[in-house]
Image (tube, helix red, strand yellow):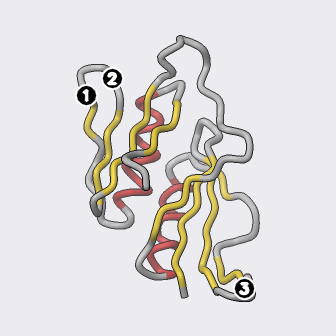
């Protein structure tokens, strides 16, 4: 359905520290910086990018936006979450755990990255 996801950041070095940690916790490789100064992460056939806004304004998180990352297990969600908090992210919402939506049980862990973008690690039980 989508080709990639991109979020804005005000400090690319700080963002790299955070995203290298959360993606590294689940087997991803450190991000590469392209000639335009954007961070690029490729893992499991998906691409995630981090950039300073091209309009020159400050990066701000999208109101109501959440980016979800598929995880292979609850333990992977927990490792992702712990790595994110240790690398400058902020734990938000309920602690990582199972949420029962009636039709489907999900294991979820939520973070905000250092620029405020809302992220979720999700494992379908």
Say which residue label 2 marks: 37
Residue visible at 30% across and 43% down in the picture: 31
How far across and how far down the image is residue 58, in percent?
Answer: 61, 19
Q: Viewed as shown, does residue 55 lie left or right of 104?
A: left
Find the distance from the CA under tag 3 to the CA under tag 1.
Answer: 41 Å
Residue visible at 51% across and 37% down in the picture: 7
Q: Name the mark nearer the viewer: 3 or 2.
A: 3
Q: Pointer 2: residues within 10 angstroms few (<14), some, or many (20+)?
A: few
Judging depth in this view, the residue of 2 and 91 nearest the camera is 2
Disc 3 vs disc 1: Cβ atoms closer than 8 Å?
no
Number of callouts: 3
Find the distance from the CA under tag 1 to the CA under tag 2.
Answer: 5 Å
Q: Pointer 1: residues within 10 angstroms few (<14), some, or many (20+)?
A: few
Q: Say whether disc 3 or disc 1 marks the residue closer to the N-terminus.
A: 1
- Assign a secondary structure to mark 3: strand
Q: Say whether disc 3 or disc 2 marks the residue closer to the N-terminus.
A: 2
Q: Relative to 32, is 79 above or below?
A: below
Quarter of the picture containing the C terminus is bottom right
Disc 1 vs disc 2: Cβ atoms closer than 8 Å?
yes
Tell me the quarter of the picture where residue 35 sits.
top left
Residue visible at 52% across and 31% down in the picture: 8
How far across and how far down the image is residue 1, in percent?
Answer: 43, 56
Say which residue label 1 marks: 34
Say which residue label 3 marks: 100
Q: Pointer 3: residues within 10 angstroms few (<14), some, or many (20+)?
A: few
Disc 3 vs disc 2: Cβ atoms closer than 8 Å?
no
- Assign a secondary structure to mark 1: loop
Find the distance from the CA under tag 3 to the CA under tag 2.
Answer: 41 Å
Q: Viewed as shown, does residue 93 lie left or right of 40?
A: right
How far across and how far down the image is residue 45, in percent?
Answer: 27, 59
How far across and how far down the image is residue 50, in percent?
Answer: 43, 35
- Assign a secondary structure to mark 2: loop
């Amino acid at each position: 359905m989508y080709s990639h996801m991109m979020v804005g950041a005000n400090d690319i070095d700080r963002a790299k520290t955070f995203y290298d940690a959360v993606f590294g916790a689940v087997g991803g490789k450190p991000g590469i910086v392209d000639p335009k100064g954007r961070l690029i992460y490729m893992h499991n056939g998906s691409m995630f990018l981090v950039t300073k806004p091209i309009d020159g304004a400050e990066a701000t998180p999208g109101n109501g936006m959440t980016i979800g990352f598929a995880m292979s297990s609850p333990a992977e969600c927990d490792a992702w979450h712990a790595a994110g908090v240790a690398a400058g992210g902020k734990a938000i919402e309920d602690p990582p755990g199972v949420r029962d939506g009636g039709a489907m049980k999900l294991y979820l862990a939520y973070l905000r990255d250092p620029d405020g973008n809302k992220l979720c690690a999700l494992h379908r039980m």
